[in-house]
Amino acid sequence: MYKVFVNDAPIIITSSLKKENEYPIYLFKDTIVDEIIYKLKHGNLKGVNLYCIDTEDALHTFYTHFKVEIAAGGLVLNKNNEILFIYRMNKWDLPKGHVEKDEDLETTAIREVEEECGITNLKIDAFLLTTRHLFYQKKKNKLKETHWFLMHTNFEGQLTPQQEEGITKVAFKDKIATETALKSTYKNIILVYQEYLKSVTKE
């Protein structure tokens, strides 16, 4: 199963016909992607299941409709197990950014967290998951695929938001503050946090 978010409304590419949510089920092969996106943005459709036999093949086909941008970022913990958040466009978010030429995902993730938060001494612990969402730029729908890593740091200095990227606040948040921040964030970020909780439970 794959999820691609459109303004926090999910397009769920699935090989299961089991009813697991309130969204309608359409056959992927009969779906006109632009129409689905329009309905999610402007209509009453809150989400949709696109049924197919091979989800990887369907996702590849779905990607052909868009220019795809690859990004990487991190869920960063300090020594108190607080989570690093950025605040941008009236939302709490996790630091991330585009992969540069000849740069691997891990390098991108660390560089972007450092640049957006003014932080150092980052170490990657594990890969968490990949999220996908559509955004509108230069009169075209584009798809961003973001690869998320669990990180830790012993940094204790002053955090500095990268204001030229529209970031106005950077902060480590404890569990209670994190739960509050997640009430004003994106669905993809909630997925990242949930995956982090799963990794903690496994330990």
Image: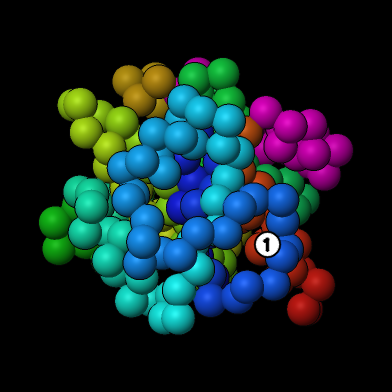
Depicted 86 relative to depicted 83: above or below = above
Figure quadrant of residue 185:
top right
**First to last magenta residue range:** 167-184
Q: Name the quarter where the N terminus is drawn.
A: bottom right
SS at mark 1? helix
At horizontal 46% and vertical 25% (from top left) the residue drawn is 42
> Is residue 180 highlighted in magenta?
yes
**Label 1 sits on what residue type?**
Tyr
Depicted 5 relative to depicted 28: above or below = above
At horizontal 35% and vertical 67% (from top left) the residue drawn is 29
Which residue in the protein does label 1 denote? 196
* Front residue (pair 152, 149): 149
Q: Does the rendering let one see residue 146? A: yes
At horizontal 39% and vertical 34% (from top left) the residue drawn is 38
Q: Position of residue 137 (x, y in %)?
A: 25, 29
Q: Position of residue 73 (x, y in %)?
A: 44, 52
Q: Name the quarter where the C terminus is drawn.
A: bottom right
